[in-house]
Image: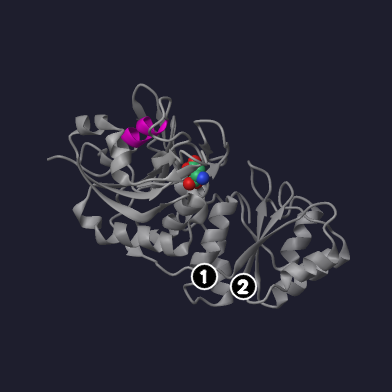
């Protein structure tokens, strides 16, 4: 039987064309995109599509779009072997992270891809990315189980876990990377999968979590951050959770005004999640006094989670109407393979 794949086209550079007057790139429709990749027919797959109207520059992506993608996958889940989401690169890692929490217990591939150059350009990376994404979405083990059973980003030479990925380059074709988790597959002459890195579903049914609560924000520490700025930010009305982006292994200023402001924030019931500003490595809160103090204030370690996964995990958890302690308990453990716990 021909593999059946559903493409969800949200927009992004892959489908853009140049405005003849302003010369800026604007999203264009799905038929334009497919006309530029006639080779897709050589795959002999049955491909259907759902198209965002209008297609978006992914800078405009919001939680309603994420719900639309997740719902489209859940509604069509039994009818397709796999799903390919065509998406702009700018917020691709956020969408991949959000979908990882929204589509719980996935047993089929959700492969997100896009391109750095529009599909109509001679040197486009879009054609190769689209074709490889389709092939991965159709790939099965010899016993018929889907090879990929999670949300993943396919870009140029690598397949990455979605909730571990970050956009690392605005220029390079290899635009994504998972700095704290190995690639799921390497793409060269063939597609070579890392079976140990891929996630496996153990017979659980798909659970769709459409709730997302945007009462979250981020604070970056930097030398020069003042008490009044920190107090102002931590008193943002309606906020339930803060991703605190710290130095190195999860360190922040030890000055009393800083720790008092953070302790007071935690005591007011706001969840503070410690994520390192480093592109690689993990929070080890007890390694330095500067990190240990944060833990004693009530700050939760984000271990080696990406910012994209941290902020979307909070949105997901706050929407579940959990108690404050339950949110902290769930934040502290991996829910979709988004972090590795190396210390406590
Ligand atoms: N601005 C574009 C987008 O994210 C960039 C891209 O697709 O590469 O939609």
Disc ID at residue 240 = 2
Q: Would you place residue 220 above or below residue 161 in this image?
A: below
Q: Quadrant of residue 238?
A: bottom right
How far separated are the C-alphas under marks 2 and 1?
Answer: 9 Å
Q: Position of residue 104 (x, y in %)?
A: 38, 60
Q: Position of residue 96 (x, y in %)?
A: 45, 51
Disc 1 target residue: 213
Q: The magenta stretch spans which residues?
A: 125-132
- Return the disc, 2 or 1, that comes first in the chain's sequence: 1
Overall secondary structure of the magenta section? helix
Q: Position of residue 17 (x, y in %)?
A: 42, 39
Disc 2 Cβ-to-ligand 1 distance below 8 Å: no
Query: Is residue 127 located in the magenta-colored stretch of the structure?
Result: yes
Point out the residue furthest to the left here: 1
Of the 4 image quadrants, the one containing the C terminus is: bottom right
Q: Is residue 182 shown left or right of residue 55?
A: right
Residue 197 visible within the image: no
Q: What colouring style does the render use? A: one colour
In terms of secondary structure, where does tag 2 sit?
loop
Q: Is residue 270 shown left or right of residue 55?
A: right
Q: Residue at x 54, y 72 (%)?
A: 326
Q: Are marks 2 and 1 in contact (CB under 8 Å)?
A: yes
Q: Residue at x 42, y 56 (%)?
A: 99
Q: Quadrant of residue 228?
A: bottom right
Query: Is residue 21 located in the magenta-colored stretch of the structure?
Result: no
Q: Residue at x 35, y 56 (%)?
A: 53
Residue 30 visible within the image: yes
Determine crowd level at label 2: few under 14, some 14-19, many 20+ residues with C-alpha closer than 10 A.
many
Q: Would you place residue 44 above or below residue 200 in this image?
A: above
Q: Quick one: 250 or 9, which is closer to the camera? A: 9
Of the 4 image quadrants, the one containing the N terminus is: top left
In terms of secondary structure, where does tag 1 sit?
loop
């Amino acid at each position: 039987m021909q593999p059946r794949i559903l493409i969800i086209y949200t927009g992004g550079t892959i489908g853009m064309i140049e405005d003849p007057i302003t010369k800026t790139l604007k999203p264009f429709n799905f038929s334009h995109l497919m006309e530029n990749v006639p080779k897709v027919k050589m795959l002999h797959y049955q491909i259907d599509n759902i198209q965002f109207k209008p297609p978006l520059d992914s800078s405009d992506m919001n939680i309603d779009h994420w719900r639309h993608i997740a719902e489209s996958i859940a509604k069509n889940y039994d009818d397709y072997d796999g799903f390919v989401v065509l998406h702009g690169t700018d917020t691709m890692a956020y969408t991949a992270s959000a979908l990882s929490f929204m589509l719980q217990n996935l047993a089929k591939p959700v492969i997100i891809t896009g391109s750095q150059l529009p599909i109509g350009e001679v040197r486009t990376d879009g054609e190769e990315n689209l074709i490889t994404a389709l092939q991965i979405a159709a790939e099965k083990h010899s016993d018929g189980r889907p090879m990929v059973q999670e949300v993943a980003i396919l870009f140029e030479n690598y397949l990455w876990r979605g909730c571990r990925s970050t956009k690392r380059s605005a220029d390079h074709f290899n635009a994504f990377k998972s700095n704290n988790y190995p690639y799921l597959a390497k793409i060269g002459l063939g597609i070579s999968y890392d079976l140990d890195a891929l996630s496996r579903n153990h017979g659980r049914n798909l659970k769709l979590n459409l709730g997302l609560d945007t009462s979250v924000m981020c604070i970056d520490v930097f030398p020069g951050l003042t008490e009044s700025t920190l107090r102002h930010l931590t008193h943002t009305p309606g906020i339930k959770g803060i991703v605190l982006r710290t130095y190195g292994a999860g360190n922040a200023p030890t000055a009393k005004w800083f720790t008092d402001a953070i302790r007071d924030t935690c005591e007011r019931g706001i969840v503070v999640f410690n994520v390192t500003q480093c592109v690689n490595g993990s929070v080890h809160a007890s390694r330095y006094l500067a990190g240990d103090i944060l833990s004693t204030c009530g700050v939760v370690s984000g271990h080696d989670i990406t910012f994209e996964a941290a902020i979307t995990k909070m949105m997901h958890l706050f929407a579940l109407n959990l108690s404050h302690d339950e949110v902290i308990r769930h934040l502290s453990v991996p829910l979709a393979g988004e972090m590795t716990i190396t210390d406590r």
